[in-house]
Amino acid sequence: MQAYHLDQFGDAARPVLRDCKTPAPGPHQVLVRVRARSLNYRDLLILKNRYPIPSVPGTIALSDGAGEVVALGEGVRRVALGDRVAGTYFQRWIDGRMTLELVSAQFGCTHDGMLAEYVLADEEALVKIPPHLSFAEAACLPCAAVTAWSALTGPRRVLAGETVLTIGTGGVALFALQFARIFGARVISLTSTEEKAELLRRLGAHDVVNYRTTPAWDAKVRELTEGRGADHVVETGGLDTLPKSVNAAGLDSQLSLVIAVTAIASPGDVLDPSVLAGRGTIRRIAVGSRTSFEEMNRAITLHGLRPVIDRTFGFLDALAAYDHFEARKHVGKVVIAD
């Protein structure tokens, strides 16, 4: 088979395409013919050697992918030949609280990932994908969708009628918008252009605020909520937007910090200490368990939800997909499909 390997790490590193042996499943293992994969910010961090968990040199890249089961090892019970499946982000985290041991095994980092024609996985690290989704759509779920689901479902689950604030048009933000609408919440979304604002409205955002023309968007969110602030904030911007996100949050709110893109807040973004006086909780999100993934898939199936795909590249054009993703001009998910 062919696969893209992470042979070197650093700012100039690139995945390397080469031939390798197709793996054979052992006991309780499954061989999956990967049909589509999607990129996440963590894949860039791994390539540049900035991810908190060291990657094994030579590992096949990417955590997110979907395909069909083509071979079974002895004793496999969770899936059958021909099943359409996706891999879980954390191979060992089935349910319950997260521990370092449970999150240490990851596709595309410590174990061979999805940027290959075939991937070998333990049966416990696979879930069946919603039947109405294509492989390309299903490949968008393991990281971004589960992260958004976790942000809105625990430990304080979003309630119908509450207000959810989302930031931007990346994969997590768009999934958070779609899930919040499923839960009956009001959504306020931030973006930078009218074109993106139209997409957000089509997906169900009740209000869209352009943070370029409205730099004091935290005050605008409070105005739109009659001074109460947002009940849930899905913070996908990072530490540079965190002060305003906290200022925009309401009493007893929950702010889910998905990723810190920068280490230093922007000049002038001062956090008003008064907003922290019993106002809410900041919670760091690390994707989610397999149980969360399966719960989310049931909701996606029931509501017929479909991921937003920005662009799909062919397998042999995977490096162009990396370039497109790193340019940060995409809206939704970037997919690599066969």
Image (cartoon, rainbow, N blue to C red):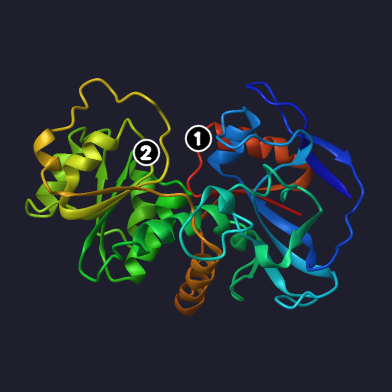
Residue type at the position of mark 1: Arg
Residue type at the position of mark 2: Gly
In the image, is residue 47 above or below residue 66?
above
Q: Is residue 118 left or right of residue 79?
A: right
The crowding category of the residue bearing disc 1, from other C-alpha atoms within 10 Å (few below 14, some 14 to 19, many at least 20), is: few
Q: In the image shown, does 137 or 34 lie closer to the viewer?
A: 34
- Residue beneath disc 2: 237
- Label 2 residue SS: loop
Residue at image coords 39%, 63%: 178
Residue at image coords 40%, 51%: 173
The crowding category of the residue bearing disc 2, from other C-alpha atoms within 10 Å (few below 14, some 14 to 19, many at least 20), is: many
Q: CA distance from mark 1 to mark 2?
A: 12 Å
- Residue beneath disc 1: 328
Q: Is residue 210 left or right of residue 68?
A: left
**Callout 1–callout 2 Cβ contact below 8 Å:** no
Q: Is residue 223 left or right of residue 214?
A: left
In the image, is residue 38 above or below residue 264?
below
